[in-house]
Amino acid sequence: MRERKAWLILHGKQALNEEVRAAVHNLREQGWELAVRLTWEAGDAERLVREGLAGGYPTLIAGGGDGTLRDVAEAMLEAGAEASLAMLPLGTANDFARAAGVPLVPMEALQLLEIEPRPVDLGLADGRVFLNMATGGFGSTVTAHTSEEMKKVFGGAAYLLTGLSRFAELRSAFGRFHGPGFEWEGDFLAMGIGNGRQAGGGHVLCPEALADDGMLDLCIVPAPQDIPATLGTLLSGGMLGLETVSIRARLPQVELEAPEGLALNLDGEPTQSNRLRFETCPAALRMHLPPGCALLGGAG
């Protein structure tokens, strides 16, 4: 029988979240030994992962947004952890959790600890981990410039408002993409390389991505003649038309060259580069996900 013992790494901003307190208390009443530790600054998630593993906790919980989930997953991979990972989604976007069908109500999310963990892949961008998606182009600029105050007031709509306010800065990027049996180069508006399906607060870039197939789903949106109109459609949720204008591929790895440099985002972490290699790390983690999870192949 699996040990009912878990180590919750909770983003410091959620320390006074009463729903989280109630969920933790409820889980303890069900017989779980649940330790709670808070992050405060960069590097805390990595340190706390090491502490939880050293303490013999068989399950770690990432309590926060996509960035917290990424930090915990990366630290677990680096530590070669055999522990399983659960999510307590508390961010603005919660893109991976939403696509996976993880409840956004804390008490319901923690009940997934009772579900047997399933192996999932991780994506790597020059060795840096992403669980959900690597994005590049204007969408990444929007994510990077959306303030915490806007997220607090407007939630996921904050990304849309930021995007609309930055139309004057719009320009396409030039890139060359290389992968097994795949070549493309040209100007593009946005790109996503997904282990998960959506980014930027719910924009579905890789609708058929699976997190356990050993592959990455690539989506490139070539730069159209009327960039502001096209981006306005995408940001306002009109993603059905994306399928007709985008270039798609499913690859185990892909190399990207962007001679002029490219703004990138790895699960909420902004970065910049002009050359990157993306690849999968198959079955790198075991995660507690809902039955019938859309991100898992087979039975889910």
Image: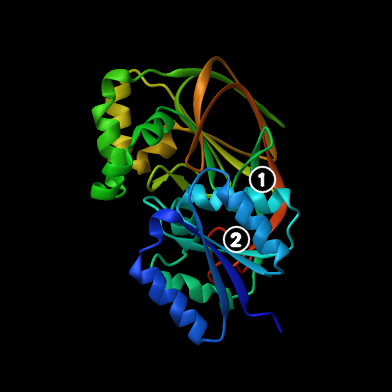
The residue beneath circle 2 is 296
Tell me the kind of residue under disc 2: Leu
Image quadrant where residue 181 sits: top right
Estimate the x, y position of residue 37 in percent, counting from the top left: 53, 62
> Pointer 1 and pointer 2: residues touching (CB < 8 Å)?
no
> How busy is the neighbourhood of tag 2: few (under 14 within 10 Å), some, or many (20 plus)?
many
Q: Is residue 50 left or right of residue 173?
A: right
- Label 2: state its secondary structure: loop
Q: Is residue 195 left or right of residue 41?
A: right
Query: Residue visible at 47% across and 41% down?
Result: 268
Compared to residue 210, the image places residue 264 above or below, namely: above
Query: Residue visible at 34% across and 20% down?
Result: 170
Query: Residue visible at 38% across and 48% down?
Result: 202
What is the number of the mark on residue 215?
1
Estimate the x, y position of residue 115 in percent, counting from the top left: 59, 75
In depth, the one of 40 and 62 nearer the eye is 40
Compared to residue 154, the image places residue 57 above or below, namely: below
Tell me the kind of residue under disc 1: Met
> How busy is the neighbourhood of tag 1: few (under 14 within 10 Å), some, or many (20 plus)?
many
Query: Residue visible at 73% across and 52% down?
Result: 79
Image quadrant where residue 146 sits: top left
Estimate the x, y position of residue 152 in percent, counting from the top left: 28, 49
Estimate the x, y position of residue 99 in percent, counting from the top left: 47, 56
- Label 1: state its secondary structure: loop
Query: What is the distance, in whole Å, between disc 1 and disc 2 at their CAs?
Result: 12 Å
Q: Disc 1 or 2, which lies upstream in sequence?
A: 1
- Residue 272 visible here: yes
